[in-house]
Image (cartoon, rainbow, N blue to C red):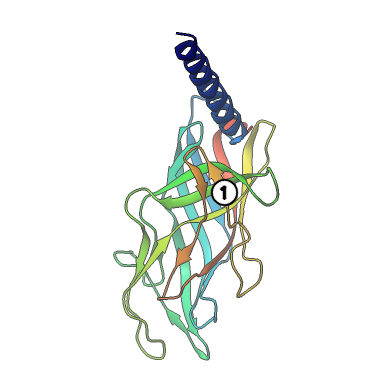
């Protein structure tokens, strides 16, 4: 009986410690302070650049617009429309490029994306946001291009994350910064911890092992919200 009691006590301690660890981990994840009545959110940016490591393929768009909705305390959904987009392939180009199904000849539109708040490894403890396809693994699909550029229909896959500011105060505006460490390097944000666990974002484009995204988006919330 004593052994049974000791085992029972040990299990209770193990479960209690596990719960404390899980609660501590969850508490560190940035969240929107809810409830809020109006959940609309819009992110707009200037120049956005997608590069393969060798810079063989570089897609540049002059602006973007991304309306969305705050779904819960750690997530949003959104769909990004990039405008005035062009492709350069080394010395070839710029060439017109668009996504499959886009209305304009130089417009790139993503599928529905999920944005998840998380804690960044670097800067340590900073708030970040991860963007990934809401279903499947394809961000968007680019149409084939013709001479002087030459690319087949190409799926952009994976996920990307950026720094989210401000935190710790209510605001109707914010900033999402997505940057590579260098023009041909990896993304600055390589690890983000969400409520679902640790994620290592990576974008795959034009058959390259990893591509980079560079973009700074100004965020407007329909109602003042705090990220804590």
Residue 29 picture location, percent across and down = 58, 36
Is disc 1 placed on a helix, strand or loop? strand
Q: Looking at the image, which is closer to me, 27 or 157?
A: 27
> Considering only vertical position in the picture, is 48 above or below 44?
below
Question: Residue sitting at 70 percent across and 47 percent down?
Answer: 124
User: Can you name the residue that lies furthest to the top here?
Assistant: 1
Question: Residue sitting at 51 percent across and 35 percent down?
Answer: 74
Q: Which residue is mark 1?
A: 192
Residue 12 picture location, percent across and down = 51, 17
Tell me the quarter of the picture where residue 148 sits: bottom left
Total labels: the figure holds: 1
Relative placement, left or right, of 146 versus 62 is left
Q: Looking at the image, which is closer to me, 154 or 99?
A: 154
User: Can you name the residue that lies furthest to the left here?
Assistant: 101
> Considering only vertical position in the picture, is 113 above or below 37?
below
Q: Looking at the image, which is closer to me, 119 or 65?
A: 119
Question: Residue sitting at 48 percent across and 18 percent down?
Answer: 7
Residue 90 picture location, percent across and down = 52, 88
On the rendered image, what quadrant is the N terminus found in?
top left
Residue 65 picture location, percent across and down = 49, 54
On the rendered image, what quadrant is the C terminus found in?
top right
């Amino acid at each position: 009986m004593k052994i049974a009691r000791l085992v029972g006590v040990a299990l209770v301690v193990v479960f209690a410690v596990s719960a404390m660890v899980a609660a501590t981990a969850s508490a560190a994840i940035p969240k929107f302070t809810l409830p809020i009545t109006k959940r609309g959110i819009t992110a707009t940016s200037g120049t956005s650049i997608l590069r393969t490591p060798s810079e063989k393929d570089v897609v540049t768009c002059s602006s973007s617009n991304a309306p969305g909705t705050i779904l819960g305390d750690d997530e949003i959904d959104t769909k990004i429309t990039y405008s005035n987009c062009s492709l350069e392939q080394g010395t070839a180009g710029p060439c017109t490029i668009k996504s499959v199904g886009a209305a304009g000849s130089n417009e790139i539109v993503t599928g529905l994306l999920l944005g998840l708040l998380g804690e960044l490894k670097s800067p340590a403890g900073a708030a970040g946001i991860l963007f990934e396809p809401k279903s499947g693994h394809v961000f968007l699909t680019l149409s084939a291009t013709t001479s002087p550029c030459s690319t087949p229909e190409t799926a952009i896959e994976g996920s990307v994350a950026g720094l989210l500011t401000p935190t710790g105060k209510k605001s109707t505006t914010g900033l999402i910064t997505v940057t590579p460490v260098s023009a041909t390097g990896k993304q600055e944000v390589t690890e983000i911890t969400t409520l679902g666990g640790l994620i290592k974002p990576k974008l795959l484009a034009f058959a390259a092992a990893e591509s980079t995204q560079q973009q700074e988006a100004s965020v407007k919330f329909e109602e003042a919200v705090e990220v804590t």
